Amino acid sequence: MRQETGRVVECYPDVFAVVNGQKYLVGHPCDWCVSIGKPDAEGNLEPIPLEGELMDEVFSTLQTMLEEDDVHLFRTPVTLTLQGEFLEDGYEGDEEDDLGEDDYDDEDEDENDGLQFDIIEEGDGQDPGDFEEEELEPTDIDADNVELIASFWHEGAEYSLVRHLDPILLVAKPSQEGDGRYALVSEAEAADVNPVLERLLEKEFS
């Protein structure tokens, strides 16, 4: 599915439907849907908007560090997506290790499956040793619909990368270019057709 910005997200099709003579496709991303947010002391997560300077900075930092472990973060439409071999092997978030830069060595990497470590980023030029130990303890995220994948620090602030456990459904219609691809609909159009599509989804999967 393609967005007006030119960004593309690969999706599995769930339902095809015709509403008021227009063909629509409802699908969900092939890769993990993830978000980056700032946790508070109670474990609540404040998601970072997909568009903005903060996301530009934080996304670039995290993407670079994940690439070192052959994990790929994409700035796809509607949601960030994550891709890596650990998706196929099966990732158990409960086994996440609390590792800083000094603790993460080759031996640890061999023993870990997937993203089971915490990332310490020296974004403000300070050495991780300059921070007090309790400040580098990752915050446990208290939410039913997300799973913590990794914690990292940028410019002295903690951020969390979480996976959405509930499916994120996207609505698209055939591209005007007639190339067989689908273009994501606008928020206004989605609001108009969503009630009909939701009923079709309930009927399909009930």
Image (cartoon, rainbow, N blue to C red):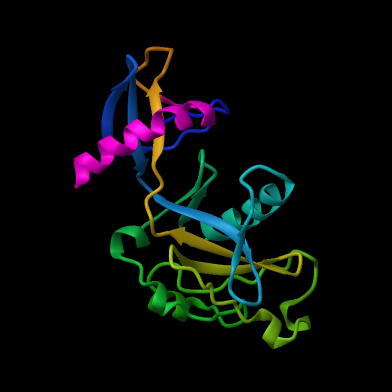
User: Considering depth in this image, is 126 or 151 the residue closer to the camera?
Assistant: 151
* Chief SS of the magenta region: helix
**Residue 204, position as x, y percentages in the image:** 20, 40
Q: Is residue 125 left or right of residue 21?
A: right
Q: Is residue 114 above or below residue 6?
A: below
Image quadrant where residue 12 sits: top left
Quadrant occupied by the N terminus: top left
Q: Is residue 64 left or right of residue 126?
A: left
Res 13 visible: no
**Residue drawn at (48%, 80%) of the image:** 97
User: Considering depth in this image, is 61 or 32 the residue closer to the camera?
Assistant: 32
Image quadrant where residue 24 sits: top left
**Residue drawn at (37%, 71%) of the image:** 113
Residue 42: in magenta span: no
**Residue 153, position as x, y percentages in the image:** 67, 68
Q: Which residues are magenta?
A: 183-206
Q: Is residue 200 left or right of residue 95?
A: left
Res 189 visible: yes
